[in-house]
Image (cartoon, rainbow, N blue to C red):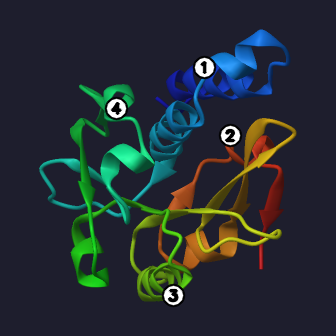
């Protein structure tokens, strides 16, 4: 099953690594949406009884991800559902929380609250660090990411070994 996921991720990563006209043709919001989907496909969570696979954002969903990219998608046999959360308690039903707010206090509070919960936190990297297990940044007009495997272990989630070589940086401690 994991091998079926790899071509999708490779295609997504290849799109962002291309130089030339293709790069400008894919909006950053669409790329982030595709990355979130592929991160989900390559992550394992403890079993839960949620009827949907919940991707949550701190800001308005439409400002954070492109809902059209995730429309009719499924992860682990569950339909993807997008929602906005405002409080850490709201994140209890989320499998992914995109920590995408300019309010650094809110991001820090949310990341700290979720650090032992089985939630894949995805943040935006600033000055070489980010709040999430996975952190996105734009370098040389490319969307890249770093992984913090120690945070993933603490959250009791498992990142596929297929994702690790694609990361620009991997933190293990």
- Would you say the residues marked 3 and 1 are in contact, meaning their CB atoms lie under 8 Å apart? no
Label 3 packing within 10 angstroms: few (<14), some (14-19), many (20+): few
Q: Separation of disc 2 and disc 3 at Cα? A: 33 Å
Q: Which mark is residue 172?
A: none
Residue designated by label 2: 162
Relative to 160, residue 2 above or below: above
Q: Which mark is residue 70?
A: 4
Quarter holding residue 132: bottom right
7 horizontally vs 54: left or right: right
Q: Separation of disc 1 and disc 2 at Cα? A: 11 Å
Q: Separation of disc 1 and disc 4 at Cα? A: 17 Å
Among numbered discs 1 and 4, the one appearing first in the sequence: 1
Q: Residue at x 24, y 83 (%)?
A: 89
Residue designated by label 3: 105
Among numbered discs 3 and 1, the one appearing first in the sequence: 1
Residue designated by label 1: 7
**Foreground residue, 171 or 34?**
34
Among numbered discs 3 and 4, the one appearing first in the sequence: 4
Label 4 packing within 10 angstroms: few (<14), some (14-19), many (20+): some
Q: Name, please, the residue furthest toward the top.
A: 21
Say what secondary structure mark 1 lies in. helix
* Residue 2: percent from left, percent from top: 52, 33
Quarter holding residue 171: bottom right
């Amino acid at each position: 099953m994991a091998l079926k996921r790899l071509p999708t991720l490779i295609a997504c990563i290849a799109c962002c690594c291309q130089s030339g006209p293709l790069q400008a043709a894919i909006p950053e919001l669409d790329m982030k949406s595709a990355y979130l989907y592929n991160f989900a496909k390559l992550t394992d969570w403890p079993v839960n009884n949620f009827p949907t696979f919940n991707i949550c954002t701190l800001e308005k969903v439409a400002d954070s991800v492109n809902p059209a990219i995730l429309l009719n998608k499924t992860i682990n046999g569950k339909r993807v559902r997008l929602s906005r959360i405002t409080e850490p308690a709201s994140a209890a039903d989320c499998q992914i929380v995109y920590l995408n707010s300019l309010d650094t206090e809110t991001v820090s509070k949310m990341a700290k609250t979720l650090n032992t919960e089985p939630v894949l936190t995805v943040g935006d990297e600033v000055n070489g660090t980010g709040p999430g297990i996975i952190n996105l940044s734009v370098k040389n007009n490319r969307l890249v990411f770093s992984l913090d495997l120690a945070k993933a272990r603490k959250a009791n989630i498992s990142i596929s070994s297929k994702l690790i070589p694609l990361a620009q940086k991997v933190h293990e401690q």
